[in-house]
Image (spheres, helix red, strand yellow):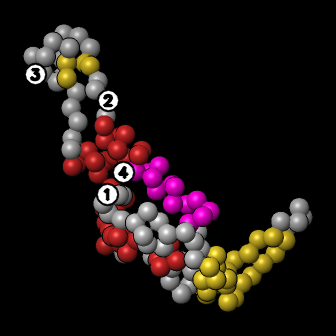
């Protein structure tokens, strides 16, 4: 889906081996060019994944929660009503992920991607399109 956004902005084309302008070539194999839009989408997603590093994630405490421990001793907790106890490290945009949390501890995606649309172009377009359908 991210690549589709880039394909709409800057389409890529296939070129035949004889350069006679016929894209549907019957006289030989079509040379495929590398799809730079795929690479742009991959780079954008990799940059977004960096924001999930532990140093950027704020420490939050829930005002209400349900928890249980499984047979291995692993604690599972579902929380509601977040209070930010410690902000994470600021992002490269000098913004903080804690600024994008609502009262329930959910991330407000539209403001986040609006503020970072220069870095995450296709993701911001996808998020705006999804939000407009709700």
Q: What element carries label 1?
A: helix
Q: What element carries label 3?
A: loop
For residue 104, above or below residue 45 = below
User: On the image, numbered disc 4 is attached to which residue?
Assistant: 2
Q: Left or right: 85 with respect to 56?
A: right
Please state which of residues 19 and 42 is positioned toward the viewer in this rendering: 42
Q: Which of marks 4 and 2 is nearer the N terminus?
A: 4
CA gap, disc 3 and disc 2: 18 Å
Q: Earlier in the sequence, mark 2 or mark 1?
A: 2
Residue 34 — which label?
2
CA gap, disc 4 and disc 3: 29 Å
Residue 21 — which label?
3
Residue 35 image position (x, y, % from top left):
31, 34
Mark 4 in CB contact with mark 2 (< 8 angstroms): no
| Residue at 29% in and 51% down | 5
Q: Earlier in the sequence, mark 3 or mark 2?
A: 3
Residue 98 image position (x, y, % from top left):
52, 77
User: On the image, numbered disc 1 is attached to which residue?
Assistant: 121
Q: Residues within 10 Å of mark 1 (few under 14, many from 20)?
A: some
| Residue at 32% in and 63% down | 117
Q: Which of marks 4 and 1 is nearer the N terminus?
A: 4
Q: What element carries label 4?
A: helix
In which quadrant of the rendered view does residue 134 lie? bottom left
């Amino acid at each position: 889906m991210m690549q589709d956004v880039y394909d709409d902005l800057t389409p890529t084309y296939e070129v035949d081996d004889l350069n006679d302008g016929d894209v549907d070539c019957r006289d030989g194999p079509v040379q495929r060019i590398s799809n730079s839009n795929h690479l742009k989408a991959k780079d954008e997603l990799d940059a977004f994944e960096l924001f999930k590093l532990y140093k950027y994630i704020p420490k939050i405490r829930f005002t209400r929660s349900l928890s249980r421990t499984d047979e291995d001793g692993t604690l599972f907790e579902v929380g509601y009503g977040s209070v930010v106890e410690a902000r994470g490290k600021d992002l490269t945009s000098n913004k903080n992920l804690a600024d994008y949390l609502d009262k329930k501890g959910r991330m407000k995606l539209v403001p986040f991607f609006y503020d970072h649309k220069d870095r995450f172009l296709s993701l911001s377009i996808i998020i705006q399109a999804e939000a407009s359908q709700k």
